[in-house]
Image (cartoon, grey):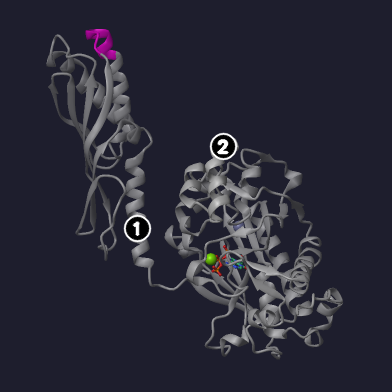
Amino acid sequence: MPHRLTAILSLSAAPARGETAIEELLPRIAAESLERAVRNRGRAELARWKLHGVELELELTSTEVRPHQALLAIQRRLQEALGKSDKVGVRSLRVPSYTLEFPVEKAPERPVGLPIPHHLTVEHKVGRLELRDLSEEAIRDNWPDRAVSLVEEKLRRQSYEGKEQYWTLLGESPRREMRAAEDPTEAMLARAWVRSGPTKGKWFLGPRAAHLLKVMEKIARTEVLDPLGFSEVVQPHHDSFDILLRTGHLEGVPGEFYYVTEPKTRDPAAWERFTDLVKITRRVPTEELAALVGPPAAVSCYAQCPTIYWWLSGRTLAEESLPLKVYDRTAISNRYESGGRHGLERVDEFHRIEPVYVGTKEQLLELRERLRERYAHVFNDLLELEWRTAWVTPFYMQQSGELAEEESGERVRGTIDFEAYLPYRGTREKSEWLEFQNLSIVGDKYTKAFTIKAQRGELWSGCSGIGLERWLTAFLAQKGLDEAGWPEGFQRVALPLPSEPRFL
Ligand code: ATP
Ligand code: ZN
Ligand code: MG
């Protein structure tokens, strides 16, 4: 695919010998730099150049490798050579226009935008992206390649939109007798076990509901994590932007975070007007407040695994520590669910245990089977749920075209969703079941992103999201709030229940 780049190099002075000075150096330097960048992959050349006073304009074309990869070398080498021959430096460069071509499978259904100056056309399966006014930093930071990748990603996303997430049934529990037909959140509200929280999507759990949530946590630890040798870690509650840049969450779900800001100062004098306004008006002076806090600098925990990967970043794990098995149950997940909120099932603040595992591919496949067995034991023998598992393809895998792996039946990298039937939503066949937890192997995506190494060989990782509110709602939706209807195994762990305060 042909590419064409126009650059302007600003010289410290016009060379006294005029174009002769350039003629002696530029064609050779450009040819050598381009050859080094291209290395037998197609052709590349200096198509033309022109000196206008202190500005040297040049045009590079290529057939395969994108020519900006040679531009900085050309600048550097010209700077050295021209300094020696004519005492002239190269101050800076900019790229007024850069046209890149790339193959496109399908014409876009809607226009594709980019946040930098550009013009995009797609014709006969060829995308032609002209980037305009690129700075030297943009070339240095490789914006051109990223811009093309982003356009390709947006085009792929358009073709996936509307298609359902890949979903194949893996296994089903026996059918169970349902002991409730009510929405469990409504039932708990009616008995004042829970109260809808003071801020969006958050709940206050009174003694009974809290006890039951903690029972779920205890079951997960004693029946799944402890027997499999997982160790608990305690992680900070705020996730840095740097971490989320590395995992991809910052570009993936920026609209789902609760952002954290810091006060600009804790000096009471700076806050005096604010506190005075509060005292007089008994309201929050929000504009005043906005001026006293900085821009968001982190997010409240979205998922726990990113910060666990950060903990391991840049480290080499000893053979005897593999597979590494840890979990966090301290950080509480916060998500802006907006219109999707429903009861305790979909909340903006939820309590989750997240086991994370790092090891060889074989170790993780083995561990996944052990986890599945332990989970099955909990859901079949203790909670006696009606549940099923499904192989689903996370969105990022669909995007990066890794779907082929699932289709070939290997089922190595990817996610298993655990779903429970909620009778209050309708029939088994027609209603949507609740994803109450999942189990993933993500390959080397995060071990690479965080440079986590083994003494030898490749390291993979994965995680499992144990949503405690979801375990609880799935259980209560099927078994009801009346303890007499609960399975014996669960009764043994959960009873006696704490008493509730009596509200008059
Ligand atoms: P969903 O598709 O239901 O939004 P998700 O794919 O966003 O879930 P993950 O990010 O994979 O969920 O999180 C893992 C687990 O965390 C889920 O299986 C669920 O148990 C729990 N979870 C996720 N979002 C919520 C929420 N808003 N409220 C309660 N639990 C949640
Ligand atoms: Zn995770
Ligand atoms: Mg979600």
Residue 312: x, y in percent?
65, 43
The residue carrying pointer 2 sits among few (fewer than 14), some (14 to 19) or many (20 or more) residues within 10 Å by Cα, namely few
Residue 393: x, y in percent?
51, 66
> What numbered label is drawn on residue 154?
1
Q: Nearer the viewer, residue 179 or 397?
A: 179
| Residue 468 visible in the picture | yes
Q: Nearer the viewer, residue 392 or 278?
A: 278
| Magenta segment includes 83 | yes
Residue at disc 2, secondary structure: loop
For residue 144, which quarter of the picture? top left
For residue 192, which quarter of the picture? bottom right
Contact check, label 1 and label 2, Cβ < 8 Å: no
Residue 498 vertical placement versus 134 (above, below): below
Quadrant of the drawing holding the C terminus: bottom right
Farthest residue in the front direction? 280
Q: Could you tell which of marks 1 and 2 lies nearer the N-terminus? A: 1
Tell me the amino acid under the disc marked 1: Lys
Residue drawn at x 18%, y 22% is 55
What residue span does the magenta drawing correspond to? Answer: 81-88
| Residue 459 visible in the picture | no
Of badges 1 and 2, nearer the viewer stands 2
Residue 482: x, y in percent?
77, 86
Tell me the amino acid under the disc marked 2: Thr
Label 2 belongs to which residue? 265
Residue drawn at x 78%, y 87% is 485
| Magenta segment includes 234 | no
